[in-house]
Amino acid sequence: MEQTQVNKNINFVNNKQLFIKQIKASYFRNYKNLELNLSADNIVLVGHNGVGKTNILEAVSYLTSGRGIRKAKSKDLIFKKFDDRFYEDLFWGVHASVFAMNKTFEIGTGIQKNNNSRLVKINGDLVKQADLSKLVKISWITPQMLLVFHNGMQEKRRFIDRLINISNPNHVGLLYRYEFLIKERVKIINNFNSNKNWIDTIENDIVNLSIKIIESRKRFVSEMQNIFFRSDLKEDFFPDICLKIAGKAEELLDSLGKEKYHSKIIEILRKNRNNGISSFIGPHKSELLIFKRHSKQEIRYCSTGEQKIMLISLIFKHCYLMESIYKQTPILLLDDIIEHLDEIHRRALFEKTSVYKSQCWFTCTNSRAFNDYPASYKSIDVNKLQKDYPKKRELNYA
Ligand SMILES: Nc1ncnc2c1ncn2[C@@H]1O[C@H](COP(=O)(O)OP(=O)(O)O)[C@@H](O)[C@H]1O
Ligand SMILES: [Mg+2]
């Protein structure tokens, strides 16, 4: 029982570096009009199942680049009511006042009528999504992320590659190009009429990209390792995690060095090409392992609860890696994470988020979990938020 006591000596961070002061959402998911006025405090969204808690986190997640916490299609975000018809003439928007880099910025984002690409404005000026992500970074932990550990290697690679992309924004671009060229090469091999001279150039690009991807992943693993070794971030309740990216390509690059690896893979590619074989070794086949540093236990063999704790540990450390690069921790969204944690880890998580330097958002169905905790968490009863369903005629606005 002793260790479940709240640590009263903890230094709560009240002067957060990055937080949302106000957020408004219009025609977004189940909200026709939503407005939340906030302070730097961490937020707890409390409400029954299906009331719209995750939808609010999703609105927040559009305050940075990308496809949000659910990776949703833009048209699915548009407020739908009545007979589940899709109202073509509607659009969605999210607006927020965000405190970042010691200033307050007005951020607007959404889609317009008949246009599916997301527009972003900062202080009234139209900017690129990439500009938004330079200003506001957001990370999240969701129950869906746990499924990754049970899925195939491709999903695991994608999960880590997305984390890498946040600290090295070219990474996913390199992968897209690499995967595109692999497909192009197969097309050329299988098509008798295609220009075979192209294949030399494509194979050369494939190998160059494969080296860059392997090196970028390797750099990430060692950067994360450094964060886990940082003494100021040591903790008792969340285990150190090791990442390992292994495969034949990694082994070859390690043992041969870049130049010899290049000629070796080119040699393999040419040989396979002449035999009509399209497969070859490379970072598209790498194995990704996530395990506890001390016990060496791999995440997929851990219990669901342990996996959640390992995921929290991994994402928090990744947030600190982002801080070491961008001098600011990201806003952190924790969807449905609290309720399934045991008491020790729940309290340890509260302590972590209390000293965390940017705003954290929680969702839960019952605020009791937060009751006896002294840190200031602003609790919002999502059941009482006005969903303000429109009348049918209101939808025909011009
Ligand atoms: N585009 C949409 N328009 C209207 N309602 C939506 C839309 N997308 C999802 N919803 C509704 O939002 C609710 C789910 O909200 P969610 O935030 O996931 O709930 P929870 O509070 O459990 O996290 C569901 O009732 C769903 O029907
Ligand atoms: Mg939810």
Image: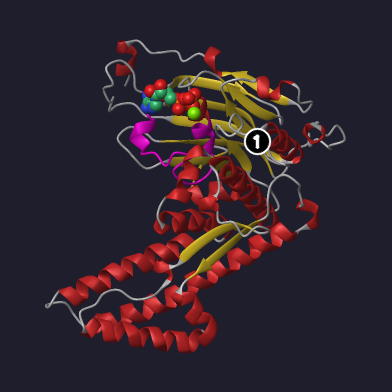
- Please tell me whether residue 133 belongs to the stretch shown in magenta: no
Whether the residue carrying mark 1 lies under 8 Å from ligand 2 is answered with no
Q: Would residue 167 be visible to someone looking at this image?
A: yes
Residue sitting at x 56%, y 45%: 307
Q: Left of 167 or right of it: where is 198?
A: left
* Residue placed under numbered mark 1 in the picture: 360
Q: Quadrant of ligand 1?
A: top left
| Picture quadrant where residue 229 is located | bottom right
Q: Left of 319 or right of it: where is 35?
A: left
Please give the range of residues in magenta: 57-79
Query: Which secondary structure is most common in the magenta stretch?
Result: loop
Look at the image and tell me in which quarter the N terminus lies. Answer: top right
Query: How many numbered circles are shown?
Result: 1
Residue sitting at x 38%, y 77%: 205
Q: Left of 213 or right of it: where is 38?
A: right
Q: Amino acid at mark 1?
A: Cys
Look at the image and tell me in which quarter the C terminus lies. Answer: top left
